Amino acid sequence: MKVLACDGIHEDGLALFRDAGWEVVVSEPLKDPAALSRALAGVDALLVRSATPVGAQALEHTAALRVIGRAGAGVDTIDVETATARGIAVMNAPDGNTLAAAEHALSLLFALARHVPSADAGMKAGQWPKAGLTGFELEGKKLGVIGLGRIGGTVARKALALGMDVAAYDPFLPPSAAAHGSVPLKPLEELLAWADVVTLHVPRTKDTTHLLNADTLARMKHGAYLINAARGGLVDEAALLAALDSGQIAGAALDTFATEPLPVDSPLRTHANLVLTPHLGASTGEAQQAVSTILARQVLDYFATGAVAGCVNLPPLTAEAAREVGPWMPLMSALGKLAARLVPAPARLHITYAGRSEALDSRPLTRLLVAALLGGVSTRVTPVNALQEAAARGLVVAETVGGNGNGFDRLLKLRIEDEHGEARELEATLHRGPRVVRLDGVEIEFDPQAHLLLMRNVDRPGIIGLVGSHLGAAGVNIVNFSLGAKGDGEALAAITVDRPVPEAQLVALRGIAGMLSLEAL
């Protein structure tokens, strides 16, 4: 396995990859998509911070890449949609830098309140700039927190300890959450009109881009202050400059920007009422060590056990849950491939997880089976994009959890239909190893991972002997022979063999009198 680490990923995380036997390649930020694309050749996992943008062009020709890891919280520099379409998991490590980001937002708050940057610059210029730098005390002031997640919640808690009056708006929390916790929730317009200081702690999405614009800035209390230590683009920078010039906003502190690094000629750099820092929110030694090791463990667990943590395009799966579903994974892949051979153009797939299923998380199993079912057509179908690919191809996937296990502790039932409604049915279990126990309603046992012949024939003596003779003459050994009578004058047999049967021999077998069909799987 090979990992490419850009943007100064902390050595503690990289050491975990080396200890696991991975090849580790360290690189400076790769801002050119073509250069990143070349660097990704043969790479299984890519680790970045915010300096290396991972766009569609860089991912266009990746064949081996299975994971993109962001050592931090925001994934707005990663084209998650393209990654998902190509079956690549996108992970982040949002918990590792929570304290660092929250403390930096508070440091900006103090800097604004006491004019620290202006005072420092004046002192270093040989001045005594006391006049005009009268600040304000934080105790008793009203802090409006936009986004009450990990970082926003930490800022709110620490601001309460400072004696501030704190309220919040969170676009991702339901109104019912307003009655819970120590921080009251307000509608955005009400919060903006109420707060002396507004601080942003939401991700940048299509809905939150320019959340603070000319209209919303005008709704803030006249002379209020603004802090953005979250993501660039949440604030319309041109509108902010206009609000600062008019005095509507008394001052602002920005750690993130729409374009990073901030252009040298940006008018933000010269405004007297702005405090600027170069995206330092997560830049503490403790935070970088934490996000690096958290991310490394997530990636290694994903490759080793299928556990999914911190993934933005896969449902979470704990290590314990991964151990529960892990034994089923080889069976799901084998059944998906078998189903693809039985029904080459599936239109509907129904999966039933019967028997004892209360502790089973079926989501990763369903994705794995669908990926194997569709993977014969495209090698870029993985559990990450399996359901998206199914929808694109018109395959309707449904699942049922619970029901009669027919004597088995757990029983997996598949019904695969083509566009004409013709269906094949499989039932499988892990009892005594991965095996199919029923095919098209007939009790018959075989290993779906083995070389297999499925035979349907007239139920009369002599046919099985002829099949054995033909295979023996071709040097093909029969490992297992399972026979089931259909009850209508026909028989169904699953013949496990030790090697693929040559095509010429398959033609000869299909020519045996009484042979109705023979499928080599």
Image (cartoon, rainbow, N blue to C red):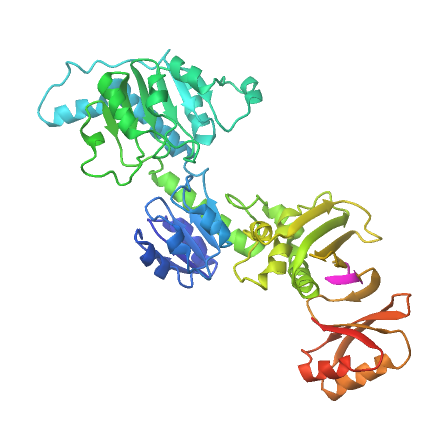
* Percent x, y of residue 333: 64, 60
Q: Which residue is painted at 67% across and 47% down in the image?
A: 362
Place of residue 100 in the rendered image (x, y in percent of width and height, measured from the top left): 37, 33
The answer to if 214 sits in the magenta stretch is no
Q: Nearer the viewer, residue 326 or 374?
A: 374
Q: Nearer the viewer, residue 173 or 422?
A: 422
Question: Can residue 435 be found in the magenta stretch?
Answer: yes
Q: Residue furthest top?
A: 140
**Vertical position of residue 72 compared to residue 373: above or below:** above
Q: Does the rendering let one see residue 433?
A: no
Q: Residue 50: horizontal and vertical position, in percent?
A: 35, 44
Relative horizontal placement of residue 347, taking residue 20 as reference (left or right) = right
Q: Which residues are magenta?
A: 431-438
From the viewer's perspective, tell me whether residue 305 is left or right of residue 481: left
For residue 311, above or below residue 461: above
Is 16 rendered above or below residue 477?
above
